[in-house]
Image: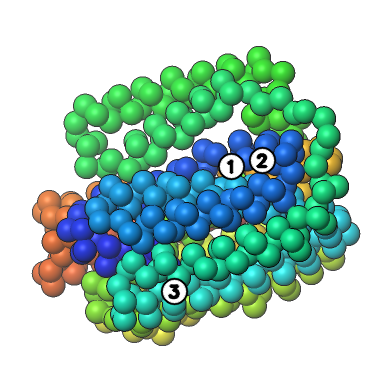
Amino acid sequence: MINVALPSIMHYFSCTFNQCQWVVVVYLLTITISLLLWGHLSDRLGKGKIYLLGMFVFAVGSSGCGFSYSLVQLIFFRFVQAVGAAMMMSTGPAIITHVFGVQYLGRALGLIGVATSAGLMSGPVVSGFLLHHFGWRAIFFVTIPVSLFVSVAGYYLVLPTLSLAVISRRIPFDWKSFLCWSLLIIFVVLLSSNHLNLKGGVVVWYLVGAVVTAVMFITVERKSNAPLLPHTLLKRKYFTVAMVTAVLSFSVLFMVIILIPFYLTLVLRLTTIEIGTVMMTLPVTLSIVSPLSGRLYDAIGAKKLTTSGMLVCAAATFLLSLLATDSGTVDVMWRLAMLGMGQAIFLSPNSASVLSRVKDKYVGITSGLLATSRNLGMLFGVAMAGMVFGFFFDYFSGGFDLNGFQAVHTTAFISSLHFSLLMAATISFVGAMISSLR
């Protein structure tokens, strides 16, 4: 919903593309940093409690976003919203693993893929409708009653069934590692999100900060008795391959869904409802293919599915890079459908390949790490889209920002989109090669 609304938000606040990008970046940044924390706390306090409290916090953040009257306020309440989302994301896969067991994990995650896709499917369409009739604030208000209803219903219907999921022993948490991890992610995002400062001295400080915090994080993790990233898991190839490919997969996905709405708005001149309909193609395909992918995992395992899924994504993003000024909506839709198919083939088997092999005591943290990998990928995808597209558009347009887009800049936009999506295709191909090493 937010991605479709970004052009409208950028116009309303009269901000640059780089500034508007932080509406998405702060959300993903907060989730990426805090997922590991909530994964550990869910093992201590109970996955059901953390999940439902997260739903309530998300509703509070949505309310604040809807009433925001400055870009700074909107970004702050997106932070609050992200805290609630992180609480849900870190516990969701662990709850599924607890309820369904290993033998049905593939098809269970496939069905969850359908539920996720239903949200992704309805999001662009609902967003387009609300933007057209009520404005961008409505896309935040519409989530509040749903969040509150699920919070209350879950308290009575779901929470009692998850009481056995709480691990009784107190699990230590290394706050030094968490602080270093947080600073590392922040510096990396600042470095990749400030492409316009690459010629100045600010980027040097970001780079130094990223290197220093990376060294500190590795040092603290090695000495820790309760590392944030369990050493026993990181030494296993199936675990590291799954995490790395999840990052690459979602990086590609978010590079596409950040940039394509701008292409549809500025080049093809579609209405918000039409944009929502076009963008819906991707999650529709996800919802159709995900259950089949989950069942195939139960039959043939993860390696062939995840590798082929990433290759399909590489082909889809390459074809998207060939979009031109005279391309039609059908040209965009079938390419997005192809990308959705590749993502669906990859996602469920990749998650199941990890959750089915870790011990019960690591399910919570593994769930948090999977969600962290996905959101780290989303975060890098948004940052890379801003950095690469912004760099090329600045070059081809002679120094203009996307907020001042005019018809004369169309050629510069298409060239920038071409190079950005070629990079996404390359990332997908690298992900396929890594996935083949499982």
Label 2 or label 3, whichever comes before in sequence order: 2
Residue beneath disc 2: 39
Does 212 appear above or below 119?
above
Does 37 appear above or below 136?
above
Q: Is residue 180 left or right of residue 97?
A: left
The image position of residue 228, as x and y in percent, is 64, 29
Mark 3 surroundings: few (<14), some (14-19) or many (≥20) residues within 10 A: many
Kindly report the distance in space between the C-alpha atoms of the residues bearing marks 2 and 1: 6 Å
Q: Amino acid at mark 2?
A: Gly
Residue appearing at x 76%, y 63% in the figure: 157
Q: Is residue 113 left or right of residue 147?
A: right
Secondary element at image label 2: helix
Q: Is residue 427 left or right of residue 175?
A: left
Tell me which colouring the rendered structure shows.
Answer: rainbow
Quarter of the image with the N terminus is: bottom left
Q: Is residue 98 visible?
A: yes
The image position of residue 435, as x and y in percent, is 65, 51
Kindly report the distance in space between the C-alpha atoms of the residues bearing marks 1 and 3: 26 Å
The image position of residue 267, as x and y in percent, is 24, 74
Secondary element at image label 1: helix
Residue beneath disc 3: 124
Q: Are marks 2 and 1 in contact (CB under 8 Å)?
A: yes
Does 135 appear above or below 133?
above
Label 1 or label 3, whichever comes before in sequence order: 1
Kindly report the distance in space between the C-alpha atoms of the residues bearing marks 2 and 3: 30 Å
Residue beneath disc 1: 35
The image position of residue 14, as x and y in percent, is 17, 58
Mark 2 surroundings: few (<14), some (14-19) or many (≥20) residues within 10 A: many
Q: Amino acid at mark 3?
A: Pro
Residue appearing at x 45%, y 53% in the figure: 61
